Amino acid sequence: MASTSILRESPRIRGCRSRAATPALLKGLLFGPTGRAMSPTHTRRSGKLYRYYVCQAALKGEVADAQIRRVSAASIEAAVVDQLRALLKSPEVVMATWRAAKAEGGVYSEATVREALDRLDPLWEELFPAEQARIVQLLIQRVDLKSDGLELRLRTQGLGIVVQELGTFRRAA
């Protein structure tokens, strides 16, 4: 009976619901060594969910192009978040954020920006996955997966927005 109800439902609707239920922190941001996008996907085995990012070349059967065919979603997402958290503490990023916030009409001092970015680090684990994904989309422009590591490109405008939100959060508390 359940299989016939699945067949009656549009594959497009089923796919959208399935994708919505599977979190993908780096969706649209992760690119492989060849510069081609890596798409989130998953599989279930023995009731356990395994998430991956797969190179578009591998998905299209062009495996000769793909140096890295797939990577564990949990591993790459953790590495990106760790690198992002470290970058948010660097003086260069703090200055770029302060300049971006100032250019957008923000009245924050450099010390306020530094304090807001410092506040994000311990708060990260308490955020819902959807909010973490929203912040990652605000902060990261692109992630390039190389054979020897990761390269993150930040969005300075997004950094300014996050600082403003954290400043508002503090005033409201």
Image: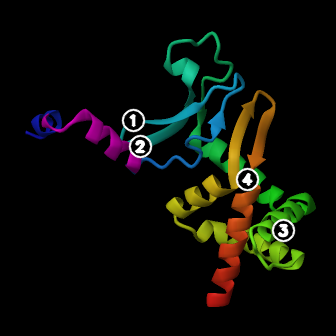
The CA distance from mark 3 to mark 4 is 13 Å
Earlier residue among tags 4 and 1: 1
Left or right, 131 with respect to 68, comes to left
The CA distance from mark 4 to mark 1 is 37 Å
At x 72%, y 59%, the residue is 157
The CA distance from mark 4 to mark 2 is 35 Å
- Kind of residue sitting beneath label 3: Trp
Whole-percent x, y for residue 111 in the image? 88, 78
Q: CB of mark 4 within 8 Å of CB of mark 1?
A: no
The CA distance from mark 1 to mark 3 is 47 Å
Quadrant of the snapshot with the N terminus: top left
- Quick check: is 27 in the magenta stretch? no
The vertical placement of 171 against 73, above or below, is: below
Tell me the SS state at disc 3.
helix
Where does label 1 land, which residue? 45
Where does label 4 land, which residue? 155
Left or right, 160 with respect to 133, comes to right
- Of all residues, the one furthest to the left in this rendering is 1
Q: CB of mark 2 within 8 Å of CB of mark 1?
A: yes
